[in-house]
Amino acid sequence: MNGKLILEDGSEFHGQLISNSLAVGEVVFNTGMTGYQEVLTDPSYCGHIVTMTYPLIGNYGVAAMFNQSRNSYVKGFVISELCEKPTNWQLEDTLEAYLKAQNIPCIYGVDTRAVTRRIRSNGAMKGVIVPAYTDAKKIESLITGYIASDVVKQVSTSETYHIPGIGPRVVVMDFGIKRNILNSLSKQGFDLIVVPCNTSAAAIEKLNPDGVFLSNGPGDPKDVPEILTTVKQLIGRKPIFGICLGHQLLALALGGDTYKLKFGHRGSNQPVKNLVTGRVHITSQNHGYAVSEDSLNTAEISITHRAVNDGTVEGMRHKVLPIFSVQYHPEAAPGPDDNVYLFEEFMTMMKNKGE
C-alpha cells in the first residue's frame, strides 16, 4: 500500500506501508548500522517514530533473545530498503512479520537520507505515517492533537521484582530500563531489586540497599517532578549511579538544568571522550535532552565525559558524595562493550562504602 511520512513542517516523504495502521509521534533518527530489533524494543523510544539512517534493514531477521523489553514502545518505523529474505543462524522470523505481529506502523522505500537531513536542519518534530490517500485535514488533526504524556509510567515496571546476586544490594529505579542493562548489572554480581518509577525514597530505604541505580528512560526529565523529588531525597544517603534519564534527573536534583537538543543523540556509534583517562569510547545513545554544563556547580561536580561530536556533557561525578552518572547506555544492546567498566566502578564505590 502506498503511504507517506509527513513532518510537522509540511515535508512529505513517500514509500510503502507494511499495514494501514496510522502512526503519530516525534520523528527522530538512529545512526546505528545494526541493532534494529533492540531499537524497536528500547523503552526510551516511547513516543517516537524512528528513522533508521542505515539503508538496508532486516537483513538478519529477528529473534526473541534480542528484545530489550516486554513490548515495543515506538510509535512507528521508517526505513529505506526492507530485506525480505534475511539470513542469520539465530534467525526466528523476518522483520516484516515482527512489525506486523507487534502492530508497529512501518513505511519503507523512503529516502531516509532526506528525512535525516530535514531533521538535522529543522530539529526533531512531530510527524505521521499514513496511507497516501489520507486527506490534509486529518493529517493536521493528528499532528496538532498529539502530546506525549506519562511516557515513563508507560514503560516502567508495575511491580517490584528481585534478580538475585551475591554482591551488594542495588535498588534499580526503572524508568524504562533495557534488559541488557539489567544483565550487565547481574554479571557484576549485584543483588538487584527493581522498583517502579514512582517508588518513594522511604520505600527504597526500607529495602536496605547498598546503592541505587537510576535507569534510562524516555521523555523530558522535567516532566516527572515526583521522581525528581525522590532522587533529591536519596542524595547523600546511598551511593548512586545514573544513566541517560537518570543522569539528567541527577543533574536537576543537584541544582543543575537540562535542555532539549536540536535532534538528539541516537545510535550505537556515538564517540565520547573520558576526560579522566583521555580515551575515546564508542557508545550507544538514545536521548533528546542534555545537561546544561553552565548550570552545574563546579565546586561540587566535575565533568568526566564529553561528546566528541558536539561537546555536550556525557558524564559527571560529585566531588564529595558517592554519585556519578553518564548520559549514554554503558552496555552493548545494540552497540560496543567499551563502557562496561562503569558497572565495575559502581561495584568498587559500594565496596568502599562510597569513600
Image (tube, rainbow, N blue to C red):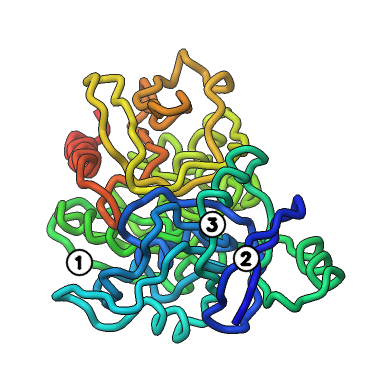
Q: Secondary structure at mark 1?
A: loop
Residue 14 badge:
2
Q: Characterize the local packing of mark 1: few (<14), some (14-19) or many (20 or more) Cα atoms within 10 angstroms.
A: few
Q: Which residue is mark 3?
A: 111
Location of the N terminus by quadrant is: bottom right
Residue 164 badge:
1
How far, Cα to Cα, is label 3 from label 1?
Answer: 47 Å
Q: Horizontal and vertical percent for residue 166?
A: 12, 58
**247 versus 9 height, above or below:** above
Disc 3 or 1, which lies upstream in sequence?
3
For image coordinates 29% across by 78% down, the residue present is 85
Relative placement, left or right, of 147 versus 286 is right
Q: What amino acid does circle 2 point to?
A: His
Q: Horizontal and vertical percent for residue 287?
A: 49, 46
For image coordinates 40% across by 39% down, the residue present is 237
**105 versus 50 height, above or below:** below
The answer to whether marks 3 and 1 mark residues whose Cβ atoms lie closer than 8 Å is: no
Q: What amino acid does circle 1 point to?
A: Pro
Relative placement, left or right, of 223 versus 353 is right
Closer to the camera: disc 1 or disc 2?
Answer: 2
Disc 2 or 3, which lies upstream in sequence?
2
